[in-house]
Image: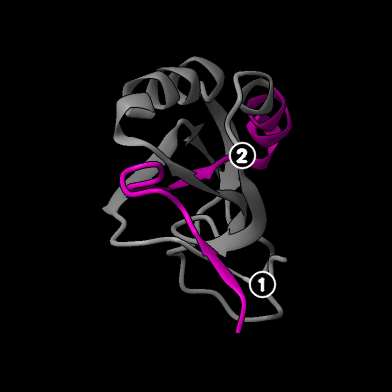
């Protein structure tokens, strides 16, 4: 097996950022222009059961604050109308009354990385 291991400390944080899909394109473009490499996964779930974008980034710890600042600058909260998901209804009833819900922003997880291995790199 041929593999390549990053030099120690080169990538030592895994950042998982869950963002609104309306923000994901501009955020991804800005992160790439700032030299970050990322993987985007379309995801869904949470309170509204709506789509999200989950960004995965392997970074050195020294770049963490820059990354968080960029995410905060690009992922703003806003209010949208959503149907109340907690109303007990039956299929023959009309949809629930729409309510205003705050969306956007980002949920960010920062994890320590023990090592990074690229498999199959020659």
Q: Which mark is residue 93?
A: 1
Which type of secondary structure does the marked residue at label 2 adopt? loop
Measured Cα–Cα span from mark 2 to mark 1 = 48 Å
Q: Is residue 39 magenta?
A: no
The x and y percentages for residue 26 are 70, 24
Of the numbered discs 2 and 1, the one sitting upstream in the chain is: 2
Q: Which mark is residue 37?
A: 2
Quarter of the figure with residue 4: bottom right
Numbered range of the magenta stretch? 1-29
> Label 1's element?
loop
Give the x, y percent position of residue 84: 50, 54
Give 13 or 109, whichever is nearer the viewer. Answer: 13
Residue displayed at 46% across by 65% down = 87
Q: What residue is drawn where x is 60% and y is 51%? A: 52
Residue occupying the point 56% across, 19% down: 74
| Mark 1 crowdedness (10 Å alpha carbons): few <14, some 14-19, many ≥20 | few
Q: Quadrant of the N terminus?
A: bottom right
Side (left or right) of 32 relative to 12:
right
Q: Nearer the viewer, residue 17 or 88?
A: 17
Is residue 5 on the magenta stretch?
yes
Mark nearer the viewer, 2 or 1: 2
């Amino acid at each position: 097996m041929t593999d390549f291991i990053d030099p120690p400390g080169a990538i030592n944080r895994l950042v998982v950022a869950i963002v609104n899909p309306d923000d994901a394109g501009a955020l991804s473009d800005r992160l790439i222009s700032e030299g970050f490499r990322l993987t985007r996964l379309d995801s869904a779930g949470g309170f509204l059961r709506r789509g999200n974008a989950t960004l995965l980034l392997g970074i050195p710890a020294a770049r963490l604050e820059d990354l968080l600042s960029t995410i905060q600058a690009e992922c703003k909260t806003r209010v949208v109308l959503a149907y109340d998901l907690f109303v007990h209804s039956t299929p023959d009833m009309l949809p629930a009354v729409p309510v205003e819900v705050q969306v956007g922003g980002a949920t960010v997880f920062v994890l320590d990385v023990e090592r990074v291995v690229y498999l199959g790199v020659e």
